[in-house]
Image (cartoon, grey):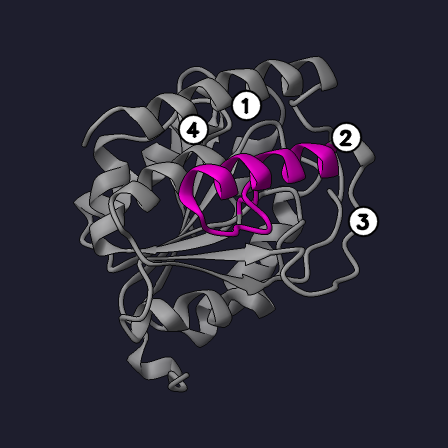
Amino acid sequence: MMIVCLESIPKTLIIVPAYNEQDTIGKTLSSLVELKEEIRNLEICVVNDGSTDRTKDIVSTFDVVQLDLSQNLGIGGAVQTGYKYAYNQGFDIAVQFDADGQHKTSDLFDLITPIINDEEDMVIGSRFLHRTDYKGSKLRRIGIYYFYVILKLLTKKSYTDPTSGYRAINRHVIELFANDYPKDYPEPEVLMHLSRKKMRIKEVTANMQGRQGGESSITPWKSIYYMGKVTLSILMQSIVKE
């Protein structure tokens, strides 16, 4: 893989969807702002997804773009808002980055380098491609493996971490997502969508950690509901002609 120097990195946007993340958003943005000081063409965009806590006030203390949604749209709507901003502002690369402290900025270069070199259209940070220190709940791991199997059967490709929210995309995929993006639990669904379009997708190892504060909005019952809903959508995509 060709090494990329900081000066040659194209216009890149980091999208941070945030819903009631007052316990973690400050630390997350501190690490991203440090990275921004190293990379001239890097911009950070926080999509405040109708938070009712102090998330908005905390984000306002940082030198970042903040897009405030008047009501909670969910992860899909929040992330698509960021992609629309990336497309309208002419960004070449967009990176999805969780607000809860799970993702590490040290993995960012591994995500964006294949895109800069025009080797991939999407790069996913995987917790399972190689052994890492990540320890998730049993239910979460079951859900991840479930979507791994479904996508393997339908696409004939192996995505070891299909629910990972740490991913980077190029300008072409930014345009696709700005116009059409799943609303609920979108990460596995877009893999099916992009696979059918023959997009180049690669996984790289990402050393993630558990949520660093606050609570996930996805309860066990919601997880089961979303798994069923997303499975149906994936199956429908597999049989409908492009």
Label 1 – label 3 distance at C-alpha:
28 Å
Which residue is depicted at the point 63% across and 24% down?
53
Residue at the (60%, 13%) spot, across then down: 225
Residue 107 coordinates in the image, percent (x, y): 57, 67
C-alpha gap between disc 4 and disc 2? 22 Å
Say which element carries label 2: helix
Disc with the residue nearer the chain's start (4 vs 2)? 4
User: How far is disc 4 from disc 3 in space, using C-alphas?
Assistant: 25 Å
Magenta stretch containing residue 205, yes or no? no
Number of numbered discs overlaid on the protein picture: 4
Q: Name the residue under label 2.
A: 139
Q: Residue at x 20, y 28 (%)?
A: 241
Check if mark 4's residue and mark 2's residue have beta carbons within 8 Å: no
Type of amino acid at the residue the image marks with label 4: Gly
Query: What is the quadrant of the C terminus in the image?
Result: top left
Image-based side of 80 in relation to 110, left or right: left
Q: Which badge, 1 or 2, is on the more N-terminal residue?
A: 1
Q: Which mark is residue 51?
A: 1
1 or 3: tag closer to the N-terminus:
1
Indicate the position of residue 131 as horizontal and vertical percent values.
Answer: 74, 64
When the figure is inspected, residue 183 is found, relative to residue 172, above or below; the finding is above
**Residue span colored magenta:** 140-165
Question: Which sits in the foreground, 202 or 12?
Answer: 202
Q: Quadrant of residue 1?
A: bottom left
Q: Name the residue under label 4.
A: 76
Kind of residue at disc 2: Leu
Q: Tell whether label 2 touches label 1 (CB within 8 Å).
A: no
Q: Which of marks 1 and 2 is in front?
A: 2
What residue is drawn where x is 34% and y is 34%? 80
Q: Mark 1 and mark 4: span between their CA atoms?
A: 15 Å
Residue 60 seen anywhere in this rendered image of the structure: no
Residue placed under numbered mark 3 in the picture:
135
